[in-house]
Amino acid sequence: MLVLVGAEDHVVPPDHRRMIADALRAAAVRHEIVEYPGAGHGFLCDRRDTFDAAAAGDAWRRVRELLAEELVESGPVRRR
């Protein structure tokens, strides 16, 4: 699981991030939580005033890498 959050995100405050990390660790879920300094909620959306181009660029890079890794590991997707 990949969690991407702005350090200034008011919707997912630091104590909630710690609770999420603790729960994922306790459940033995492979995860990474990335906090972007200075970024707020909605930093990925280029239509919001909270858009952060640098954070969004890094976040999308991480998403693409994770999908490439997971799709290779899981093999081809079969359609019904």
Image: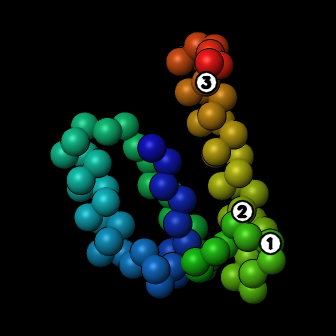
Q: Secondary structure at mark 1?
A: loop
Dot 3 or dot 2: first in sequence order is 2
Say which residue label 1 marks.
Answer: 46
Q: Quadrant of residue 73?
A: top right
Say which residue label 3 marks.
Answer: 71
Q: Secondary structure at mark 2?
A: helix
Q: Secondary structure at mark 3?
A: helix
**Total residue callouts:** 3
Q: Nearer the viewer, residue 66 or 54?
A: 66
Q: Residue at x 75, y 86 (%)?
A: 49
Q: Position of residue 20 (x, y in %)?
A: 31, 60
3D distance between C-alphas at marks 1 and 2: 9 Å
Whether residue 52 is visible: no
Q: What's the residue type where badge 1 is placed?
A: Asp
Say which residue label 2 marks.
Answer: 56
Q: What's the residue type where badge 2 is placed?
A: Ala
Whether residue 5 is visible: yes
